[in-house]
């Protein structure tokens, strides 16, 4: 059975993490503001457990206001191409979730740069408790469903079947609900960058 996550809770949690960084607590201010125009962005999100062990959720390409950290922290998220050339790197602190037993989460929306669709091969989150990597072999299918009319994210679905069956299941769910589908196994497929 698929895990269906309440979009409001997840986006709210992610928003609160970004907001915590924006207040200067731990990670320093964020470069985004509520008035930033939406643009094609690489949606990066994840967190760390109470021991500081990091994890990454599959990355997506969405229309969103840019949101990147400013300042320094103990964590670094880096995107690289097949040769190991750095495409982006962000240093930041992961804000602790209120009542999260020491766990923390983050979300960033990096404006997409030319060539990322073809070149991005891996995303690694490193911190004091280890590292977590997504690459082209990662197969943890996840879907985000968005209301086309309002632009609101209505559902986030995890634990889809691996391989092609995951995309098929996500497409069937989108057809059933009428919502717009965003899909990722880890690194967005090249076709998903140009939607």
Image: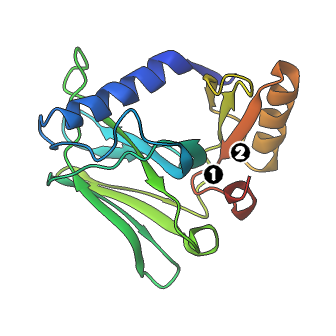
Residue 88, percent from left and from top: 38, 67
**Colour style of the rendered protein structure:** rainbow
Q: Which residue is mark 1?
A: 139
Residue 36 versus residue 10 in the image, above or below: below
Query: What distance separates the C-alpha of mark 2 from that of mark 1?
Result: 6 Å
Q: Residue at (60%, 64%) from the top-left corner?
A: 136
Nearest the camera: 41 or 123?
41
Q: Residue at (49%, 66%) from the top-left corner?
A: 122
Rate crowding at label 2 as few (under 14), some (14 to 19) or many (20 or more) other CA atoms within 10 Å: some
Residue 154, percent from left and from top: 64, 20
Q: Secondary structure at mark 2?
A: loop
Could you tell whether 23 is left or right of 54 in the image? left
Nearest the camera: 33 or 23?
33
Residue 14, percent from left and from top: 39, 30
Mark 2 or mark 1, earlier in chain: 1
Q: Residue at (22%, 36%) from the top-left corner?
A: 22
Q: Is residue 104 visible?
A: no
Q: Which residue is mark 2?
A: 162
Residue 95 versus residue 155 in the image, above or below: below
Rate crowding at label 1 as few (under 14), some (14 to 19) or many (20 or more) other CA atoms within 10 Å: some
Could you tell whether 24 is left or right of 114 in the image? left
Q: Is residue 136 visible?
A: yes
Nearest the camera: 175 or 50?
175
Q: Secondary structure at mark 1?
A: loop
Q: Count all numbered tags in the image, as a single digit.
A: 2
Q: Are discs 2 and 1 less than 8 Å apart at CB?
A: yes
Residue 13, percent from left and from top: 37, 23
- Quarter of the picture holding the N terminus: top right
Could you tell whether 156 is left or right of 48 in the image? right
């Amino acid at each position: 059975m698929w895990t269906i996550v309440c979009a409001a809770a997840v986006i709210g949690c992610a928003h609160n993490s970004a907001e915590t960084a924006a207040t200067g607590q731990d990670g320093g201010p964020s470069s985004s503001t509520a008035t930033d125009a939406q643009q094609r962005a690489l949606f990066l999100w994840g967190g760390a457990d109470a021991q500081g062990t990091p994890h990454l959720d599959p990355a997506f390409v969405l229309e969103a206001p840019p949101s990147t950290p400013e300042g320094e922290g103990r964590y670094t998220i880096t995107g690289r191409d097949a040769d190991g050339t750095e495409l982006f790197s962000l240093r930041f602190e992961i804000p602790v979730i209120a009542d999260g037993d020491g766990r923390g989460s983050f979300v960033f929306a990096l404006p997409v740069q030319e060539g990322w669709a073809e070149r991005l091969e891996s995303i690694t989150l490193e911190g004091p408790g280890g590292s977590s990597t997504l690459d082209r072999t990662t197969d943890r299918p996840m879907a985000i469903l968005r209301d086309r009319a309002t632009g609101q994210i209505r559902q986030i679905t995890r634990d889809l079947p691996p391989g092609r069956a995951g995309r098929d299941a996500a497409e069937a769910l989108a057809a059933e609900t009428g919502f717009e589908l965003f899909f990722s196994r880890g690194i967005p497929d090249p076709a998903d960058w140009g939607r």
